Amino acid sequence: MLADQAAGEIAVRFALTQAVLSLRDVLLVAHSRGLRITG
């Protein structure tokens, strides 16, 4: 059971990391293009 929990945590961390990196890329591209993001 501990292995399953560890695998679950790793999967969640990986997903969060990918989401953060994707969001950062979007923000960097938007900034480089001079777009304004409201909100």
Image: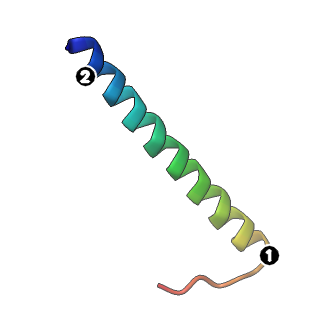
The residue carrying mark 1 is 33
Give the residue drawn at x 76%, y 80%.
34
Q: Inspect the image, locate mark 1, and give the three-letter code of the amino acid beneath it.
A: Arg
* Residue toward you, 11 or 39: 11
Q: On the image, which quarter does residue 33 sit in?
A: bottom right
Q: Position of residue 18 (x, y in %)?
A: 54, 44
Give the residue drawn at x 25%, y 22%.
5
Q: Can you say whether 21 is above or below 14 in the image? A: below
Figure coloring: rainbow
Is 22 left or right of 2, judged from the image as shown?
right
Query: Which numbered dot is residue 5?
Result: 2
Q: Position of residue 9 (x, y in %)?
A: 32, 29
Mark sitting earlier along the chain (2/1)? 2
Q: On the image, which quarter does residue 2 sit in?
A: top left
Q: Inspect the image, locate mark 2, and give the three-letter code of the amino acid beneath it.
A: Gln
Which secondary structure lies at badge 1?
Answer: loop
Disc 2 crowd, CA 10 A, few/some/many (<14, 14-19, 20+): few
